[in-house]
Amino acid sequence: MFPTKYRRRNTVAFTVLAYFTFFAGVAMFSIGLYNADNLQLNEKGYYIAVMILVAVGAILTQKVTRDNAEDDDILAEQERLLNNSRGPISSKES
C-alpha cells in the first residue's frame, strides 16, 4: 500500500566520526606546527600523515553534511506525501 520508508544513509556514529576526524587532524597539525623548530625526516612524515588525515576528514565531513541535508529533504517530502495520502479525518473515526 505505502512505499517502504526511507532511512538515513549515515548513522550518528559515522557523522560524529567524520567531524572528529577532521577536527583531530587540524588540531594535530596545529600542535605539530607550534612545536616545530627545524624539520627532520621523521617530522616531515608526520606532517604528510596529518595532512592526509585532514584531507580525508574534510572529504568525509562534506559527504556527511551533504547526505544528511539530502536525507532531511527526502524524509520531509515523504512525510508530506504520507500526510496528504491519509486525507482529512472525519468525525466518525474519532
Image (cartoon, rainbow, N blue to C red):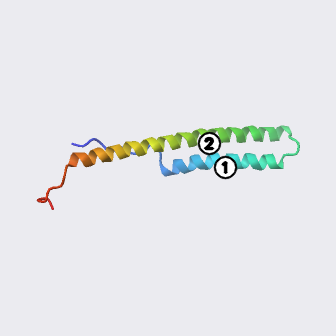
CA gap between label 1 and label 2 equals 9 Å
Choose between 93 and 14: the one closer to the eye: 93
* The N terminus, quarter of image: top left
Q: Residue at x 74, y 37 (%)?
A: 48
Label 2 is placed on what type of residue? Gly
Task: Give the mark nearest the N terminus, 1 or 2.
Answer: 1
Q: Which corner quadrant of the image does residue 6 belong to?
A: top left
The residue wearing badge 2 is 57
* The C terminus, quarter of image: bottom left
Q: Residue at x 22, y 45 (%)?
A: 85
Furthest residue toward right: 38
Q: Residue at x 61, y 41 (%)?
A: 58
Q: 93 above or below 20?
A: below
Label 1 is placed on what type of residue? Ala
Label 1 SS: helix
Are the two marked residues, 1 and 2, in contact with CB atoms closer than 8 angstroms? yes
Q: Position of residue 31 (x, y in %)?
A: 77, 50
Q: Is residue 93 left or right of residue 49?
A: left
Furthest residue toward bottom: 94
Q: Is residue 7 left or right of residue 38?
A: left
Q: Position of residue 16 (x, y in %)?
A: 55, 51
Neighbours of disc 2 within 10 Å: few (<14), some (14-19), many (20+): many
The residue wearing badge 1 is 24
Furthest residue toward left: 92
Q: 31 above or below 39?
A: below
Residue 86: give its label: none
Q: Is residue 11 left or right of residue 22?
A: left
Q: Position of residue 92 (x, y in %)?
A: 11, 59
Q: Is residue 68 left or right of residue 24?
A: left
Neighbours of disc 1 within 10 Å: few (<14), some (14-19), many (20+): some
Q: Position of residue 20 (x, y in %)?
A: 61, 50
Choose between 23 and 94: the one closer to the eye: 94
